[in-house]
């Protein structure tokens, strides 16, 4: 499973954030790693320099082998919360998709 992290210009500390994101995604989606070819994460700060309650956004897209990409989005107060929320949503989506695929076999 390849993990690619993209950030906008308002996200500081890119190297640290990338390491944290990769760890969160690997632990949340690890059970699907043989089926996932790539996970793309796009992190953004919607308000830039201004503060807001849910201005951090994580869009996560997972590509299962032979399937169209699945995407989820989560907005939260911090990048870590947004990533954890998106990873949780993705885990539930993939669990449902993989379950349906196994039923057809």
Image (cartoon, helix red, strand yellow):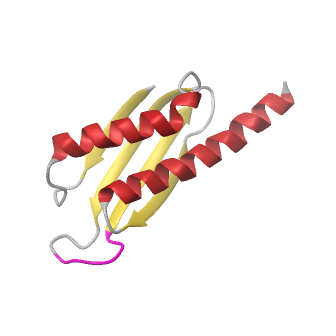
Q: Quadrant of the C terminus?
A: top right
Q: Where in the figure is residue 26, as x and y percent of width and height?
A: 44, 33
Front residue (pair 30, 1): 30
Choose top left, top right, bottom left or bottom right for residue 70.
top right
What span is colored magenta in the figure? 50-55
Residue most extreme to the right: 104
**Residue extending farthest top:** 34
The x, y position of residue 12, in whole percent, is: 14, 54
Please provide percent x and percent y for residue 97.
70, 40
- Which quarter of the picture shows residue 31? top right
Q: Is residue 96 above or below residue 34?
A: below
**In front here: 41 or 22?**
22
Q: Main secondary structure of the magenta part?
A: loop
Residue at image position (55%, 47%) is 90
**Residue 62: % across, % down:** 51, 39
Nearest the eye: 61 or 78: 78
Name the residue rendered at 19%, 56% in the picture: 11
Q: Could you tell me which residue is drawn at 63 percent across and 47 percent down? A: 93
At x 19% / y 42%, what residue is drawn?
16
Residue 56 included in the magenta stretch of the image: no
Query: How many marks overall?
Result: 0
């Amino acid at each position: 499973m390849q993990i690619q992290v993209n950030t906008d210009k308002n996200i500081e500390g890119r190297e640290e954030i990338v390491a944290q994101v990769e760890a969160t995604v690997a632990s949340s989606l690890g059970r699907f790693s043989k089926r996932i070819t790539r996970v793309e994460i796009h992190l953004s700060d919607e308000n830039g320099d201004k503060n807001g309650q849910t201005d951090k956004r994580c869009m996560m897209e997972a590509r299962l082998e032979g399937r169209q990409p699945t995407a989820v989005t989560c907005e939260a107060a911090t990048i870590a919360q947004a990533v954890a929320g998106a990873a949780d949503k993705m885990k539930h989506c993939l669990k449902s998709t993989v379950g349906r695929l196994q039923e057809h076999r």
